Image (tube, rainbow, N blue to C red):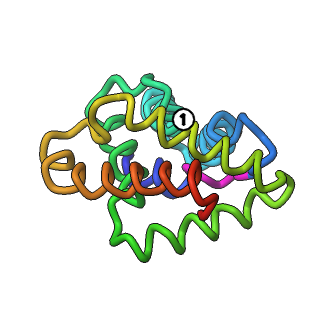
Amino acid sequence: ELEAGLWFQDVVYDAKRSDNEEESARVAAAALKDLGLAEERVDRIARMIRATRHNGSAQTKMEQLACDIDLLSLAVPEATFRRNTRLIRGEYGHLNDDDFRRGRAAFLEKMLGKGRTFYGEAFELQYGPAATQNMRSAVERLKGTGEW
């Protein structure tokens, strides 16, 4: 179920939309039902996909694990994190630079405000410090020099 959810998690992705996870969950549900997967399993997978909105809705261990995996990109080495941020900027080409900076900084500050990045203790211990450092540095750049 976890693997299926991760495969379908961003099957619908458009930076201009706010319902990507919901639409991805719908696509996954339809495809998995067509493959004959039991309704209860389809529902668990769809809930897991929706949980990757990172809005605090992850309730089960599987939903939390999917969220932790989704957030691992915050804990990559700094050079990779900065490159990824430039790539994310490209995805948001419809925004002007100031709006992108504000939106990206707001997202990162929201993540920092949670007190921890990851649900799982092992994830937090291993990856939390790097994620926190990357996010703090990025917020400083976005609000200071304006760099991505």
> Which image quarter holds the C terminus?
bottom right
Q: Which residue is mark 1?
A: 53
Decide whether the magenta segment is chiefly helix, strand or loop.
Answer: loop
Amino acid at pointer 1: Arg
Taking depth in this image into account, of 70 and 61 the one nearest to the observer is: 70
Taking depth in this image into account, of 94 and 59 the one nearest to the observer is: 94
Image x and y of residue 41, in percent? 43, 34
Q: Which residues are magenta?
A: 9-13
Image x and y of residue 79, in percent? 42, 76
Membership of 56 in magenta stretch: no
Residue 145 is left or right of residue 12, and the answer is: left
Image x and y of residue 143, in percent? 58, 48
Q: Residues within 10 Å of mark 1 (few under 14, many from 20)?
A: some
Q: Residue at x 37, y 35 (%)?
A: 63
Let me know if residue 38 appears in the view: no
- Look at the picture and state if 128 lies above or below 79: above
Residue 93 is left or right of residue 134, and the answer is: right
Let me know if residue 28 appears in the view: yes
Q: Residue at x 56, y 53 (%)?
A: 144
Q: Quadrant of residue 85?
A: bottom right
- Look at the picture and state if 60 lies above or below 118: above
